[in-house]
Image (cartoon, helix red, strand yellow):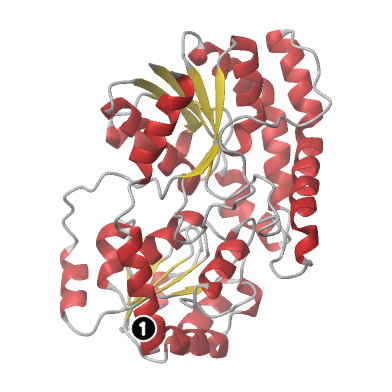
């Protein structure tokens, strides 16, 4: 069978879809990935045919765009970018989707992908890294956790989904008319299959989800031989397992203040720091903290004691799979949802947001993570997650849905 895989987001959004594309190819199918251009390095390394979509997400989330996160404007700017590119994305989806059996859709390109599948007359399969399907089990992951009575959980998800559709409806309908001569849609799509690349050990499948909505397990990149730089090997061998700190593509905070919080909170503990898009000057790090580049989490995190991170789905899963506790510092989107999942599992302290991070709160959260019972729970969850095969589950589900 032939598949088009369509997404738009940061590296953390694209990597799991590149892994899924590779898994489909390894199962004997054809797959072509459309995604944000700067995030396609993983697809290239995996040998997945890929084409960049218009737009540059770093203009919004990184460098100058960091100000948008600081001011809370990142969602609005991402929406603006997606709306401006809706027609281009739909043209690309139709072009590369011709002759395919299904379109797997995710991220900001979701409504474009659903429109392309409608025009081409093929199955649309949603792929998510956090839950979008309404349920009474929890509130919308895009809302602060713990604020609504349980009776409003499903309603909150329906409301958020409707608001998201409203934000994209005008540009989506304009693109549908110009590219495909399709009539405008008044309401959001419902009923299509949804596959979630998340662990059932972190997010058990709600009983009230439709039968075509599955929790597959994390969509991991294939393990590969990786040789660490000499400095990293020497640092790891020189003492006890360090703490990992990295906030991925998050930015918008004051780098000096964040550096002071990290250094003060560690209080001399050994740590590895991945600067990502933070803008922190690593030359200012003390000797107990080693700056690292882009390092495979499946290699690095099992060699650490605690992971301090932003709560993105990928890092949340990788830390949990490694069997280590977390200190989650949520910034935006679904990150507070994953922070709450780890808190409820007893493997992370409760920290409301990056704005609450300082030397004292970081030190307190690390002390919580270092407790013996917290470590034991993290190890138990990690053992269960390492038995999952999320990619195989997703491929089997896709084959069943399309056959």
Q: In this image, 258 relative to 325: left or right?
A: right
91 w.r.t. 66: above or below: above
Q: Quadrant of the C terminus?
A: top left
Question: From where the camera sits, is residue 112 visible?
Answer: yes
Q: In this image, 390 relative to 56: left or right?
A: left
Which of 203 and 176 lies nearest the eye of the viewer? 203
Q: Residue at image x 63%, y 72%?
A: 353
Residue receiving disc 1: 286
Q: Quadrant of the N terminus?
A: top left
Which of 17 and 382 lies nearest the eye of the viewer? 382
Q: In this image, 208 relative to 299: left or right?
A: right
Q: Residue at image x 61%, y 18%?
A: 116
- The spot of residue 126 in percent (x, y) is 56, 34
Residue 376 picture quarter: bottom left
Question: From where the camera sits, is residue 324 visible?
Answer: no
Q: In this image, 197 relative to 107: left or right?
A: left
Q: Secondary structure at mark 1?
A: loop
For disc 1, the neighbor class at 10 Å (few under 14, some 14 to 19, many from 20) is: few
- The spot of residue 205 in percent (x, y) is 54, 52
Q: Residue at image x 80%, y 22%?
A: 185
Residue 384 picture quarter: bottom left
Which of 57 and 394 lies nearest the eye of the viewer? 394
- The spot of residue 74 in percent (x, y) is 68, 52
Q: Residue at image x 16%, y 50%?
A: 225
- The spot of residue 46 in percent (x, y) is 28, 35
Residue sticking out furthest to the right: 186
| Numbered disc total | 1
235 w.r.t. 393: above or below: below
């Amino acid at each position: 069978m032939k598949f088009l895989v369509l997404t738009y987001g940061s590296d953390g959004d694209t990597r799991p879809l590149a892994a899924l594309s590779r898994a489909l190819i390894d199962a004997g199918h054809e797959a072509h990935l459309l995604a944000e251009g700067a995030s396609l390095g993983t697809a290239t390394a995996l040998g997945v045919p890929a084409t960049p979509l218009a737009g540059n997400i770093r203009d919004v989330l990184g460098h100058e765009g960091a100000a948008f996160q600081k001011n809370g404007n990142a969602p609005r700017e991402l929406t603006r970018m997606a709306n401006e590119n809706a027609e281009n994305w739909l043209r690309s989806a139709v072009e590369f989707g011709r002759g395919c059996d299904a379109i797997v859709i995710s991220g900001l390109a979701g409504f474009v992908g659903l429109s392309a599948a409608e025009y081409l007359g093929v199955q649309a399969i949603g792929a998510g890294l956090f839950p979008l399907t309404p349920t009474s089990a929890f509130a919308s992951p895009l809302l602060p956790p713990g604020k609504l009575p349980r009776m409003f959980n499903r309603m909150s998800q329906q409301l958020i989904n409707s608001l998201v559709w409203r934000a994209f409806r005008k540009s989506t309908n304009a693109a549908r008319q110009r590219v495909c001569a399709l009539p405008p849609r008044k309401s959001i799509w419902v009923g299509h299959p949804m596959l979630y690349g998340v662990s059932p050990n972190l997010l058990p499948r709600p009983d009230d989800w439709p039968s075509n909505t599955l929790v597959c397990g994390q969509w991991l990149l294939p393990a590969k031989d990786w040789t660490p730089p000499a400095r990293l090997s020497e640092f790891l061998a020189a003492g006890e397992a360090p703490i990992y700190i990295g906030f991925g593509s998050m930015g918008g905070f004051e780098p000096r203040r964040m550096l002071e919080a990290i250094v003060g909170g560690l209080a001399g503990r050994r740590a590895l720091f991945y600067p990502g898009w933070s803008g922190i000057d690593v030359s200012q790090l003390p000797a107990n903290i080693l700056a690292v580049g882009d390092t495979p989490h499946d290699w690095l995190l099992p060699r650490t004691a605690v992971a301090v991170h932003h709560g993105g789905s990928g890092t949340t899963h990788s830390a949990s799979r490694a069997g280590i506790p977390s200190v989650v510092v949520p910034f935006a989107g679904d990150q507070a949802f994953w922070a709450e999942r780890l808190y409820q599992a007893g493997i992370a302290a409760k920290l409301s947001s990056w704005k609450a991070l300082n030397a004292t709160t970081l030190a307190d959260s690390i002390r919580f993570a270092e407790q013996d019972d917290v470590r034991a729970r993290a190890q138990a969850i990690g053992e269960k997650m390492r038995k999952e095969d999320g990619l195989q589950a997703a491929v089997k589900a896709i084959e069943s849905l399309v056959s």
